[in-house]
């Protein structure tokens, strides 16, 4: 297969996974449902898949491709941590409201 075509296919796959992770983090709408849904477990798994692809292709992709994947992974990880922290705060707020209502 042509090297340029392989590069396009690989970056298309990575881009698809990155977009999927953004949807799972609730940062963009799912185009199928036109809704924002948050699934942090699925987002974590998708981010892990991107990292695995990076590791498995090490030495077989260009520096530019590596840079793009690294940047995507870093942005996704930072947003995952922020989403996880927000989710935890929201749950704690909800729990304290429930405790006050029970009094």
Image: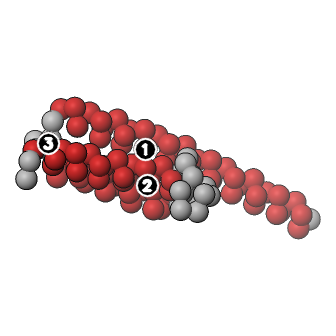
The mark lying in front, picked from 3 and 1, is 3
Which residue is pictured at 23% across the width and 37% down the height? 65
Q: How many marks?
A: 3
Q: Residue furthest bottom?
A: 102
Q: What residue occupies the far right of the structure in this picture? A: 103
- What's the CA distance linking mark 3 and mark 2? 24 Å
Q: Secondary structure at mark 3?
A: helix
Q: Residues within 10 Å of mark 3 (few under 14, many from 20)?
A: few
Give the side of residue 80 with respect to residue 2, left or right: right
Q: Earlier in the sequence, mark 3 or mark 2?
A: 3
Q: Nearer the viewer, residue 38 or 77?
A: 38
Spatial CA distance of label 3 from label 1 is 29 Å
Residue 27 image point, x, y percent: 55, 47
Secondary-structure class at tag 2: helix
Q: Pointer 2: what residue? A: 20
Q: Which residue is mark 3?
A: 4
Residue occupying image coordinates x 39% and y 48%? 18
Residue beneath the point at 29% across and 53% down: 13
């Amino acid at each position: 297969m042509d090297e340029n075509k392989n590069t396009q296919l690989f970056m298309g796959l990575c881009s698809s996974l990155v977009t999927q992770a953004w949807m799972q983090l609730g940062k963009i709408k799912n185009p199928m449902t036109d809704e924002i849904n948050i699934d942090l477990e699925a987002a974590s798994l998708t981010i892990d898949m991107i990292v695995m692809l990076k590791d498995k292709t090490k030495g077989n992709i260009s520096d530019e491709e590596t840079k793009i994947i690294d940047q995507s992974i870093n942005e996704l990880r930072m947003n995952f941590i922020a989403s996880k922290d927000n989710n935890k705060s929201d749950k704690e707020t909800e729990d304290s409201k429930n405790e006050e209502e029970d009094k």
